[in-house]
Image (cartoon, rainbow, N blue to C red):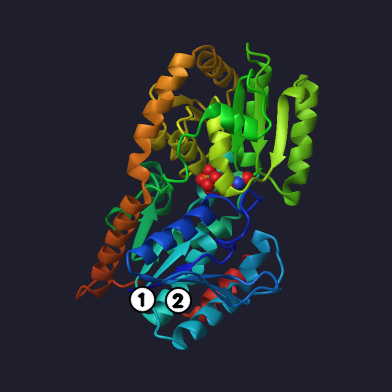
């Protein structure tokens, strides 16, 4: 079975921890690798954004295909929208130049838009995964609004997809409630984790190798440096800790995140905790197990996470997690067993639970053991098979006689709509 995996706005081979490169990049690459191991032929399609080969073999059965869509240089995610018609034309031509595909699997709304058009044109089942939803971001963030056109497109994509994969029950409910998605077409499959890479390492050695002190509590935050991640709450919480020798490591962020980093540094200075906060910049994914293992607690104070890989990676390394009670985190962190879930936007309860954990090495060790045991369900070999089941269900639904097919759409109308939204 040949899969066209569509990740238009960001390449799964791009360095992680930038403003736009995080969980989705990891997910698309690791899922594709797993599917290739299962015998699928997978081509990942992304936008050409530099002097890079158009087709790059990644693993047996897995290639990355870079299609021209606008300038061959990095551009803002929002600006990519107007180049999607060119991306769609390129993908269609590529499909016709080879053996073609059996199914399209798209990621994020921009690729979902491309996938919806291509599914009509190539007569293929379309599986979509949104990763984040405009409506949800709007509700979580207050103020910084997502364009209503994005939400309108998401609604159309959700209603026309053959199947939708959601990473958590929470996302599934949101799609049903706010987007009118058909529950029978939705499949909840959690994200996978490389449990051989993310495993507990000796704490003292991990600290020594990273030049971290052995005698101070260490709190860890990892991710894309973005407002939605709630770092200002974390800084307020650290300022309110009883353990005032705790060191906070903030891992992630590239040049494009420099303004937010400067804001956070100013906040830390104003709170009088600048000496207790260390920004490392982005760290290679494969080096992260040492960071998680070196830390006493990993903190995830996000306003929203559709899944939240970082929390699961930390637990896989035997590190307890203190996280906001939002989105997918509710289905990964077990409150009072593998960490604590905190009502969002409140620094005080974060500080309180962090102090509880920092004061109790035994509790930390118990939580850590429970955390590692709890992540077994996210092993890629399990998750890959569940996605394969979704593909089978989508193909069956697509081929069923009398299956309700989405209305025919005129590609020109879509092109006009997408260009109008850019
Ligand atoms: N990540 C990384 N290096 C960094 C920062 C982040 O490899 O410097 C990875 C991290 O290990 C995780 C992903 O980026 O796999 C972030 O995923 P998550 O689901 O937590 O957040 P998202 O990016 O989807 O908002």
Quadrant of the rendering where the N terminus is positioned? bottom left
State yes or no: discs 2 and 1 in contact (Cβ < 8 Å).
yes
Residue 176 seen anywhere in this rendered image of the structure: no
Q: Which mark is residue 279?
A: none
Query: Measuring 69% from the left and 31% from the top, which residue is drawn there?
Result: 211
Query: Measuring 78% from the left and 43% from the top, which residue is drawn there?
Result: 259
Mark 1 packing: few (<14 Cα in 10 Å), some, or many (20+)?
many
Number of numbered callouts drawn: 2
- Direction from residue 280 to residue 39 in the image, left or right: left
115 or 231: which is nearer to us? 231
245 or 287: which is nearer to us? 287
Q: On the image, which quarter does residue 69 sit in?
A: bottom right
302 or 402: which is nearer to us? 302
Query: Measuring 51% from the left and 48% from the top, which residue is drawn there?
Result: 135
Against 36, is 323 above or below? above
Q: Which mark is residue 118?
A: 2
The residue wearing badge 1 is 124
């Amino acid at each position: 079975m040949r899969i066209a995996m569509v990740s238009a706005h960001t390449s799964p081979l791009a360095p992680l921890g930038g403003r736009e490169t995080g969980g989705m990049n990891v997910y698309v690459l690791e899922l594709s690798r797993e599917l290739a191991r299962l015998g699928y032929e997978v081509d990942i399609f992304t936008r050409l954004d530099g002097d890079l080969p158009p087709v790059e073999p990644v693993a047996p059965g897995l290639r990355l295909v870079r299609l021209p869509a606008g300038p061959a240089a990095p551009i803002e995610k929002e600006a990519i929208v107007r180049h999607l018609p060119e991306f769609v034309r390129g993908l269609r031509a590529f499909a016709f130049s080879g053996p073609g595909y059996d199914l399209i699997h798209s990621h994020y709304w921009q690729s979902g838009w491309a996938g919806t058009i291509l599914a009509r044109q190539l007569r293929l089942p379309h599986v979509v995964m949104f990763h984040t939803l405009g409506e949800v971001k709007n509700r979580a963030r207050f103020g910084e609004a997502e364009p209503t056109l994005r939400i309108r497109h998401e609604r159309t994509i959700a209603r026309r997809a053959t199947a939708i994969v959601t990473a958590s029950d929470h996302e599934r409910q949101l799609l049903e409630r706010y987007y009118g998605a058909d529950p029978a077409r939705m499949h909840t499959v959690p994200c996978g984790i490389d449990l051989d890479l993310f495993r507990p390492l000796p704490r003292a050695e991990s600290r020594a190798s990273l030049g971290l002190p052995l005698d101070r509590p260490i709190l860890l935050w990892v991710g894309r440096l973005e407002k939605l991640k709630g770092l200002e709450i974390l800084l307020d919480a650290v300022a309110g800790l009883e353990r005032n020798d705790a060191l906070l490591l903030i891992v992630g962020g590239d040049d494009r995140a420099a303004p937010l980093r400067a804001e956070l540094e100013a906040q830390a200075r104003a709170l009088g905790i600048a000496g207790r906060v260390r920004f490392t910049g982005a760290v290679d994914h494969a080096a992260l197990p040492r960071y998680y293992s070196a830390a006493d607690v990993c903190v995830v104070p996000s306003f929203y996470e559709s899944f939240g890989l970082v929390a699961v990676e930390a637990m896989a390394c035997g590190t307890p997690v203190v996280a906001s009670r939002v989105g997918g985190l509710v289905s990964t962190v077990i409150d009072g067993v593998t960490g604590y879930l905190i009502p969002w936007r409140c620094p005080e309860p974060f500080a309180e639970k962090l102090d509880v954990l920092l004061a109790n090495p035994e509790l930390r060790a118990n939580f850590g053991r429970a955390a590692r045991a709890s992540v077994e369900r996210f092993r890629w070999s399990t998750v890959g098979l569940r996605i394969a089941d979704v593909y089978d269900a989508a193909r069956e639904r697509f081929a069923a006689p009398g299956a309700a097919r989405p209305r025919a759409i005129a590609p020109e109308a879509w092109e006009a709509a997408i260009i109008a939204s850019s």
